[in-house]
Image: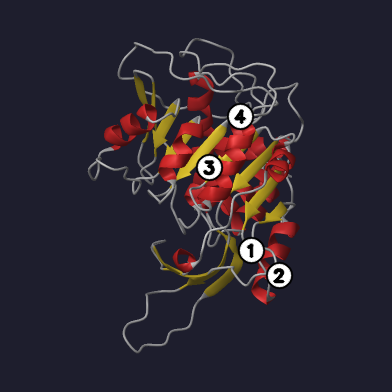
Amino acid sequence: MAKQAGGAQAAALGAQAPPLGAMERPAGLFVGLTTLDTIYRVRHPPGPDEKIVADDLVVAAGGPATGAAVAFAHLGGRATLVSAVGSGPLAAAARADLASLGIRHHDLRPGEPVLPISAILVNAAGERAVVSAHGALPVAAPVTADAARTLLAGADVVLVDGHQPDAAVSILAARRLLPTMSTATPEPAAPRASTRPPGTAPPTETATTAETATPAGTATSAGWPPVVFDGGSWKPGTERLLPHVDVALCGSAFRPPGVGADDPDGVLGYLLAHGCSFAAVTRGPGPIRWAHGQVRGEVRPPAVQAVDTLGAGDVFHGAFAWSIAGLPRLTTDALVEALAAASRVAARSVTSFGTRSWLTRGAARAE
């Protein structure tokens, strides 16, 4: 069983702890995809009609929202995952894995054989090849209003990954009907006391302009948690999610309509124009480009020797959600610092094979 972690674990991993006075264990709601991943470590992919023997094997629940929930729970949060796992022995294996990590699960399609399986090959250079059948599965129906309110109760942050859009939109719509104590707009960057754990490095940030703007407000009260969007790629229904999103974190493969290839500034502009208050684009080990209003900047992740990059983006998103959960206000400084903290956790995760080894390695370093 993977060990749960608290503040000491977060500090050891280089994540930003929620401020004192916030809940000791922040709560996160994660909505999206669950798969059962079979991850093989091979020296080279097999050729036509070739059979090879893997050097190592990991079987674990995967998917963007699932991987983010795993990271969030490992850092000390209380994670609830909303996804379709269904029935059957493979679903039971995925459900048992989630339970062992302390993740509460709400099944969108109970009793149905719907869990997709992914076959993943990781070579000696840490490069991966993935085959998954989740694209052939029908999406789940919207969540009822009562169920949505129950899932949102007590949540400090919500993350959606673009899968299960009907369920996600119904939950996000219910969020806007919750009573709120206050709402706040992300504030321009200003000098402030750092909330980084002692001994961790500050983010490397370069703003291209000092002019700031005041975009649409971000809800930051306990009754109206901020929404983080994990944009791995553009999917049907993404356009319905963006108006509900406060912070969009997208990979280099995310390409909105009308935006060309390799145009992170175009992606950032699109996200801000379609409802997001703060947006960032990751590029593997390269700089993370971010934008808020008219301010632009970069955060440089730490350089590490990667063994396996599978799931690094999911870890990044989960660590980011954990860093902002419970913050009283989402200032630009706090969001940029959360990017840096999340990149440090993600960098740690790629130094071992599979999507679970880093949990044990991190726990050992905290003790």
Q: Residue at x 65, y 42 (%)?
A: 29
- Asked where in the image residue 360 lies, by quadrant, the reply is bottom right
Q: Helix, strand, or loop for circle 2?
A: helix
Image coordinates of residue 128 in percent, x first then y, are 41, 64
Q: Residue at x 36, y 25 (%)?
A: 297
Tell me if mark 3 has few (under 14), some (14-19) or many (20+) residues whose alpha carbon lies within 10 angstroms of its own.
many
Q: Earlier in the sequence, mark 3 or mark 1?
A: 1
Q: Is residue 361 among the parts visible in the rendering?
A: no
**What residue is disc 3 on?**
317
Label 1 is placed on what type of residue? Val
Q: Earlier in the sequence, mark 1 or mark 2?
A: 1
**What residue is disc 1 on?**
85
The reply to whether discs 2 and 4 touch (Cβ–Cβ < 8 Å) is no
Q: Is residue 142 left or right of residue 249?
A: right
Tell me if mark 4 has few (under 14), some (14-19) or many (20+) residues whose alpha carbon lies within 10 angstroms of its own.
some
Q: Helix, strand, or loop for circle 1?
A: loop
Give the alpha-carbon distance from disc 3 to disc 4, as whole Å.
Answer: 22 Å
Mark toward the viewer: 4 or 1:
4
Q: Of 284 and 352, which appears nearest the observer?
A: 284
Mark toward the viewer: 1 or 2:
1
Q: Of 52 and 82, which appears nearest the observer?
A: 82
In the image, residue 233 above or below residue 153: below
In the image, residue 166 above or below residue 93: above
Give the alpha-carbon distance from disc 4 to disc 1, as whole Å.
Answer: 27 Å
**What residue is disc 2 on?**
92
